[in-house]
Image (cartoon, grey):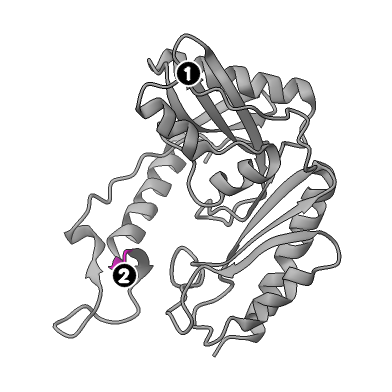
Amino acid sequence: VTSCDELFKVYGEVQDLLSKLVINSGALERDSVPVGPGATSVKADKCMNTSVVLEEYLDGQEVDIDIVLSPGLGCTYCGIHDNGPTMEPYFAETWGVLPSALPDQDVDELKQLALQSLEATGFTEGVFHVEGKYTSRGPRLIEINARMGGGPVWIVHKLAFQVDLAVQAMLLSVGIPAIPIHDPNCSNGAVAWLAVNAPKSGHIPDFAFLKQWLDWPHADVKISRPMVAEGEKIVGPEDGQPSWLVDIIFVASNPSEATHLAAMLYREVEQECVKHYG
């Protein structure tokens, strides 16, 4: 979108798309079955606000910044991990690497952006998950989550830096300072996580094949498990935002190597999953 006319046109197209979506098992999907007495889905615009806010697209490397703020002590922990290219047009996460492979100066600027953003919004204590990008114009904020990061965030920080973010949150909740003892040089090298998006709709009757990556020769795989149940309906990009199929976490020697391996393994797992559709 490069003009006001295009902005209104695209907004209209998005609104039209949203008006045709349905909610099925908590997920927004395109309506492939007519809504009626026997339907399991509900038209989205009947039970939620389908208005949208169009934001500026930010180029560059996306990162997640996990921070612990302790009263009177300020920032006692900050871990920044890179995100892989998202699944478009849904911006769905695909993989990530902790710590970031960005230059030290870029990482420091992102940390300062996150801390200044938390200060500007009045936060002085807690565990926070801040998302941003290092763009061609420098660091930019995407969002602040006043909570611990979800999904694999808790596990990867514990593996990489021996920091348990859940424990830090509990300590703060009862008035005890959170001062996690950690190795800033990441004694475990680098930790990568994958959340493989479904390449198409359907179902997978048996996920036993996932065990093969526990013996992957290129890295130390700690976790390889499904993110949907066997036989459960899987949503592919042709029907809406894709389901996440597989969760994999591994340790590599350094962030650059982990980045290379994460991209390679993501493609490998995606292709293998297709072979096992029922």
Marks 2/1: CA distance?
39 Å
The image quadrant where one finds the C terminus is: bottom right
Image coords of residue 188 (percent x, y) = 77, 43
Specify whether residue 208 is painted magenta: no
Q: Which secondary structure class fits the magenta region best?
A: strand
Relative to 65, residue 15 above or below = below
Q: Residue 117 shows which numbered tag?
A: none
The answer to whether residue 277 shows anywhere in this view is yes
Q: Is residue 243 left or right of residue 258?
A: left
Dot 2 crowding, Cα within 10 Å, few <14, some 14–19, many 20+: few
Image position, residue 264 (x, y; %): 79, 62
Instruction: Pick whichever, 162 or 275, lies toward us.
Output: 162
Residue 136 image offset from top left, x and y in percent: 70, 28
Horizontal arrangement in the rendering, residue 175 relative to residue 136 (left or right): left
What residue sits 42% from the left and 16% below the top? 124
Q: Which residue is mark 1?
A: 70
Is 36 rendered above or below residue 28? below
* Residue furthest bottom as drawn: 278
* First in sequence: mark 2 vs mark 1: 2
Query: Is residue 23 highlighted in magenta?
Result: yes
Which residue sits at x=64%, y=81%? 274
Q: Which residues are magenta?
A: 21-26
* Disc 2 residue type (three-letter): Ser
Say what amino acid the circle numbered 1 marks.
Ser
Characterize the local packing of mark 1: few (<14), some (14-19) or many (20 or more) Cα atoms within 10 angstroms.
many
Q: Residue 99, percent across and down?
A: 72, 37
Please state which of residues 210 and 38 is positioned toward the viewer in this rendering: 210
> Can you identify the residue that label 2 sits on?
25
Please, which residue is most extreme toward the top here? 72
With respect to residue 53, does 40 lie above or below?
Answer: below
